[in-house]
Amino acid sequence: MKRNEMKLAFISDIHANLPALQAVMKDIMQHQPDDIYCLGDLVNFAGWDNEVIDLVKKHGISCVLGNHDEGIGYNKTQFRFSYNSEAQFEFGLQSIKKVNETITEANRRFLRSLPFSIQLQFHFPFYHFRMTLVHGSPVSNEDYVRQSMDDYSLLELLDEANADILVMGHTHIPFKKEIYTEEENRKLYKHIINAGSVGKPKQGDNKPCYVILSIDERFEMANPGTVQAQIHYVEYNTEEVIQHIKELGLPGAYNDFLRTGY
């Protein structure tokens, strides 16, 4: 007989890319998750800022505050963002200006209302565990948590978050990592998960991605197999995004990136 499990979907870093979000949401619905969470950066890049926020609201998706959400929410004219060339840097400045001109006040207030983190506690028949959702790290929504970090540093982040499972975005590169540790003479595993990016993926291709986290009802901290994180990739029409950015009067600095992912 098949065991019961809890299934959660995580999306992140949409960056106003409505076609990518629509494709991801269609794919997510096929898995029938118990809940969907967004790990921040709904806005600033592809030009559908209001539409993305409205769709997230429509689906009742709980979100944390990304660094771009914070910048636009507080009407900043400049804030830190990643770029790989002077052309992309100029695009970033023009994009911030455009979003600040077009976002509705209701949606700006929505961005300001987003929490820095979300803490969840789950009680299963045999164990209970804690999950923390952030954009960058438990310390800052501008921090980059990477898979290459050593286990000791990652365990420090888990301790900072008071979490057994830590889920984040911001790097735009998905990963999942099990970390072995011991607490009070108990051998157990903790988990770090990055949901990647819906609207601006950087994993080496241009496919939006998201994570489905499945947790067995017989969850055990000592058994990493009772927590399964699957990274899903989808296809969408990047040319629609490139054309929309052009129609907004923004430069084509990211055209090649949107087509290839690098």
Image (cartoon, rainbow, N blue to C red):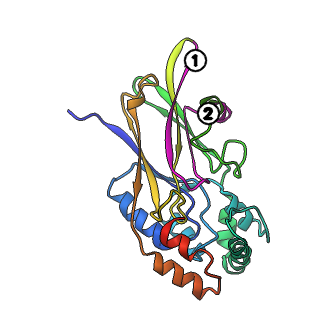
* The quadrant where residue 137 appears: top right
Please provide percent x and percent y for residue 10: 48, 51
Mark 2 vs mark 1: give the one in front. Answer: 2
Crowding at dot 1, Cα within 10 Å, few <14 / some 14-19 / many 20+, comes out as few
Q: Label 2, on which residue?
A: 150
Secondary element at image label 1: strand
Q: Which stretch is magenta?
A: 156-184
Amino acid type at circle 1 is: Glu
Q: Name the outermost residue toward the left.
A: 1
Question: Looking at this view, is 36 or 44 the one in front?
Answer: 44
Q: In the picture, which quadrant includes the C terminus?
A: bottom right
The answer to whether mark 2 and mark 1 are in CB contact below 8 A is no
Name the residue: 54% across, 74% down: 256
Q: Is residue 130 magenta?
A: no
Q: Amino acid at mark 2?
A: Asp
Question: What's the CA distance linking mark 2 and mark 1?
Answer: 18 Å
Name the residue: 66% across, 76% down. 103
For marks 2 and 1, the one nearer the N-term is: 2
Closer to us: 173 or 232: 173
From the viewer's perspective, is residue 184 above or below residue 257?
Answer: above
Q: Residue tagged by mark 1? A: 183
